[in-house]
Amino acid sequence: MKTIYKYINLYFLLGLIVTIGLLNNSCTSPKTTNLLQEKTPVYPAKPYKDYKLQINDEIYCSIFTNNKDFTDVFNGIISADATTSSSYTIYDTGNITVPFFGDIHLLGQSIPEAEETVQNKMRQAIPDAQVKIFLKNNKYYIVSEGKNGTYDIYKDNMTIFQALAISGIPDSDYETGKVKIIRQDETGRSIVKQFDLRSESIIESEFYYIKPNDLIYYSTSKSAFFRITSFQSLVSTLLAPISVVLTILALRVN
């Protein structure tokens, strides 16, 4: 019996050490999760700039005119409000190809600039043509082990905090101090950058405003593996090995 008690005491001692370690790893402090903290790194401010069209972007181009003959030929039907709307891709050349008007270069232009460019081209044939352009792929993406999704950018100067209000704030299972963002330049080349979501200085920085095609990646926190989700799970984890040890020792005694 002394041997049994010796093993039980040893197991409880080891269990206590393991439990303290698990609790230490599973505890999260406000500094781990709170946003808008005064902490390093400090990111330099960068003013908001209109999005510039990139290769492989898709745009909707709506044309308004009183020339029903044009809309009849251009769209195949005469619409009630004399409006046509079509989708166009910006190719590697930086151009879109519009029926009857040929190639129009839009790469590197903002949406208002692109509207003016297309409108000037069309007004050579249709003096009253008015053009409205919308970005078809005006979305951002969230990728992580358990949180994934595609979300619409509902306004031009949408911030990272507004994006989080839509997609959800990552919990302590994710490394909010090492958030990666994959962002494309106007040539379509992907650039990976990392920032601390908790830092107050991200306001007005290059990470503050969400851009079309942004992919935000949350890596899993190392402490998530040791996280205790409930007291019951801790008790059952510790009691299961105890029952096994007691069973083995009882068989040895017998």
Image (cartoon, rainbow, N blue to C red):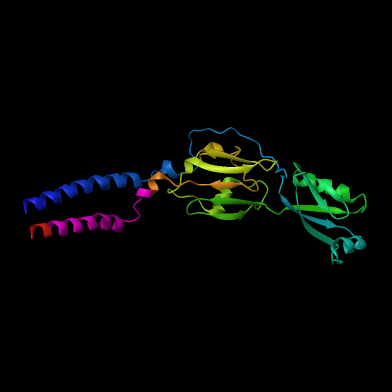
Depth check, front residue: 131 or 190: 190
Asked if the stretch drawn in magenta spans residue 138, the answer is no
The number of discs equals 0
Horizontal and vertical percent for residue 106?
A: 78, 45
The dominant secondary structure in magenta is helix
Residue 239 highlighted magenta (yes or no): yes
Residue located 56% across and 54% down the image: 166
Left or right of 139: which side holds 116?
right
Residue 11 visible in rendering: yes
209 left or right of 112?
left
Please provide percent x and percent y for residue 62: 80, 56
In this picture, is 245 found above or below 47?
below
Residue 197, visible in the rendered structure = no
- Depth check: give the residue in front, 194 or 110: 194
Q: Where is residue 75 in the image (x, y as percent from the top left)?
A: 84, 62
* Magenta range: 225-250
206 relative to 72 in the view: left or right: left
From the viewer's perspective, is 75 left or right of 89?
right
Query: Which residue occupies 31% across, 47% down?
Result: 23
Q: Which residue is drawn at 56% across and 34% down?
A: 43
Determine the image quadrant of residue 241.
bottom left
Image location (x, y in percent) of residue 153: 64, 52
